[in-house]
Amino acid sequence: MEHLKIVASAQQLPEHQVTNQELSHIMDTNDDWIFSRTGIHQRHIVTTENTSDLATSVAKQLLDKSGMTADSLDFIIVSTMSPDSLSPSTAAIVQGAIGATSAFAFDLSAACSGFVYGLSVATSLLSTRYRRGLVIGSEVLSKLVDWQDRTTAVLFGDGAAGVLVETTTENIGLLGEQLRTYGNKGDNLLAGQFANKNPFAGEISPVDPYFHQNGREVYNFATREVPEVLQAALEEAEVSADDVDYYLLHQANARIVTSIAKRFGQPTDKFPTNMAQNGNTSAASIGLLLNELVVSGKVHAGQTIAFVGFGGGLTVGAQIWKI
């Protein structure tokens, strides 16, 4: 019986870092105000890179680390809410840049749940005729931020991370998952709205590319719905909360992570965070955290890991893996 293996992980963060203190020069805020509410001290912001540049770097690193060639890939999935363009997709740009001539490529839009949703799609693909692919979360959220709005500008950062996955006969892989969407609550987190300017349109809505969110509602949603979805994934995987070695949650807010750890009666050191350095990087955040833990040796083969994404849509995705 074939299973799914995460062969390698990689990341790419822009070199330029913007601290909370620097933000205080362009808006009415300060480090104490931001950190006490979010757990964020700084974030990485692009200067010349676009979403596909970060994703391409991750793809090349994944091939180098795994010893695979680009022409051995069957597919490339890029989860993003900040693509270079609607067409070509960011994934198609990556495919061309690395010369993955045998791979099909497409973007997936599930905001902060994008990495988990991408892994779910990859799992389905690998259960059929395909054998190897890339799942990358890549975001340049600084394109979507109103830098005069302190309620959103302080939250987000840019970055990319991903994994190379392939089929294996080892008894590992995805044990259980739950994917849920709450479209009736979607207007609590908006970004990238288009205007219809066709000559037959009635009332023309304005172009509004920027983030808008009801922070209180999103916080309440995360602390209420995420634990229920995670519990359902644990039950499907037939493991207890104690059996999980690490919980890798979307890095949106330190208080949300702490709340969920407490809800499951788990020590906070099983819920690592990196939003202090990176901010909220949407679809990239879980992959960034995973790669950091792999590089440090904290996450390794034989462990049980939970991936939990939540955010725009509104969406939640929880998976339990034996890696």
Image: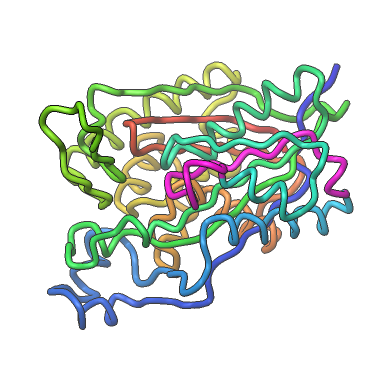
Color style of the picture: rainbow
What's the residue at 48%, 54% (across, down)? 139
Q: Nearer the viewer, residue 182 or 270?
A: 182
Residue 150 lies in the magenta-colored region: no
What's the residue at 40%, 62% (across, down)? 157
In x, y percent, where is residue 76? 69, 39
Secondary structure mainly formed by the magenta segment: loop
Magenta stretch in the rendered image: 69-89
Can you say whether 197 is above or below 30 in the image?
Answer: above
Residue 88 lies in the magenta-colored region: yes
The quarter of the rendered structure image containing the C terminus is top right
Q: Nearer the viewer, residue 79 or 266?
A: 79
- Snapshot quadrant of residue 104: top right
- Snapshot quadrant of residue 173: top right
Can you say whether 3 is above or below 323 in the image?
Answer: above
In x, y percent, where is residue 108? 52, 35
The quarter of the rendered structure image containing the N terminus is top right
Q: Which of 192 and 190 is in front in this view?
A: 192
